[in-house]
Amino acid sequence: MKVLVTGGAGFIGSNFIRHMLAAHPGYTIVNLDLLTYAGNLENLSDIETLQKYRFVKGDICDKGLLEKLDFDAVIHFAAESHVDRSILDSAPFLQTNVLGTQALLEEARRRGCRMVHVSTDEVYGSLAEGAFHETSPLMPNSPYAASKASSDLIARAYCETYGLDVVITRCSNNYGPYQFPEKLIPLVIANALQGRPVPVYGDGLNVRDWLYVGDHCTAVDAAFHKGGAGEVYNIGGRNEQANIGIVRRLLIAVARKTGAPEESLLGLIAFVKDRPGHDRRYAIDPSKIERELGWRPSTPFESGIDGTVDWYLSHRPWWERIISGAYREYYDLQYGKRAIL
Ligand code: NAD
Ligand code: TDX
């Protein structure tokens, strides 16, 4: 099988491609990624020369390009993914997340192939009590969440109207290796290691439901191979954490591993103005994917967080090259001279 993975140079996509190549040695993976600020080919440097892996630099909105690519299934991760950026400028979110998803759905329809649309729990909005179910109403609060909810609805419509074989997954917050250091967990670790302030929005009591990225990858794999056409699967590890608890845990772990005084790292916490429209709480009920597809997460939060701190400690050049902007040279150095397609 030739699988088109979109957004494979990003955080989850790069972890997913590595998972797929190991778990399904017979597959060929085509990674279509525009290499926006969030795309980093260094995330895949260990596999880039494999015969069964191919990188294509391009836009999911480019229908002419999609027609030319050789694949027989789509797993769609590409997106503008950061809530704060969507508050500053929603335009690229609507372009990529809504119109880009429509272009892929149209191409999947033209070929009659399966597509997994990777979405998020943020489409459900904020939760006072209980947990999000697949049937919970979509009540997105940020432009990012609204763009993802829109793409979910278009995917649903392609199934209902054209009979497209599309599966939608909605996962909770991911953490782990290769996450861009604008997101909470890598930002805290990188700032702690540089002695920079650690911004905590509002009162720090907003709750997120955290899942190790490797567990998200096995869930998307299960949805791709075993998910029902037109079905939605929530993905999560029943792991609710308040932001301030995570921040403190990370700073204490960094102190322990580096020998820095715990109090000085905890002193970096800076409560700052809240994010506009900041969702108070997310919680996912993953019973459906557990029951119907037999999926279970395998990484406990304690060891996942500990391993993630170790990863950022041992990959300091990786995130320093992002902060300095040097990571953007990688494509030209490695790929610039061999044109793709
Ligand atoms: P990311 O920002 O790290 O990566 C996104 C990737 O998409 C980048 O490599 C970027 O270059 C690429 N991209 C952006 N626009 C493109 C375009 N027009 N054409 C082709 N490629 C383009 O994001 P992530 O955190 O890895 O998230 C991946 C997917 O998972 C997204 O759809 C996101 O909504 C979803 N998701 C993320 C989380 C999370 O916690 N990070 C949780 C649930 C769902
Ligand atoms: O500096 C910060 N300080 C802070 O308090 C940052 C960057 C975040 N936060 C808070 C906001 C959130 O309550 O931490 C929480 C997590 O923030 P993010 O890492 O920005 O993630 P979130 O907004 O929850 O969205 C993430 O999970 C769902 C991903 O970015 C989305 O792509 C995914 O859909």
Image (cartoon, rainbow, N blue to C red):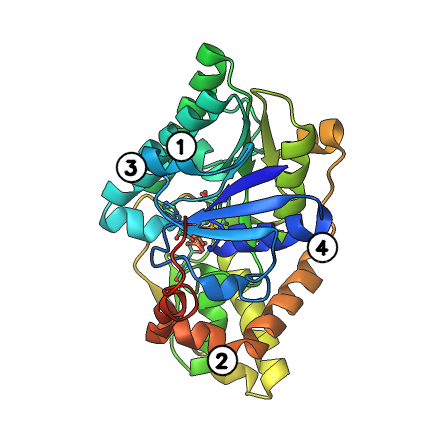
* Left or right: 326 as drawn, with respect to 129: left
Which percent across, then down, holds residue 91?
23, 42
Q: Is residue 88 left or right of residue 144?
A: left
| Percent x, y of residue 195 | 42, 82
Tell me the crowding category of disc 1: few under 14, some 14 to 19, or many 20 or more residues within 10 angstroms, Cα based: some
Q: Secondary structure at mark 3?
A: helix
Sequence-wise, the earlier of marks 3 and 4 is 3
Report the front residue among 113 and 171: 113
Give me the residue at 59% from left, 50% from top. 16
Q: Position of residue 270 (x, y in %)?
A: 38, 70
The label shown at residue 94 is 3
- Tag 1 secondary structure: helix
Q: Which residue is mark 2?
A: 265
Residue 184 seen in the figure = yes
Amino acid type shown at disc 2? Leu
Kind of residue sitting beneath label 4: Thr
* CB of mark 2 near ligand 2 (< 8 Å): no
Taking the spot 32% from the left edge, 38% from the top edge, the residue there is: 62
Q: Which residue is mark 4?
A: 299
Q: Residues within 10 Å of mark 4 (few under 14, many from 20)?
A: some
Q: First in sequence: mark 2 or mark 4? A: 2
In this picture, is 167 found above or below 173?
A: above
Q: Nearer the viewer, mark 2 or mark 4?
A: 4
Report whether the residue tagged 1 is closer than 8 Å to ligand 1.
Answer: no
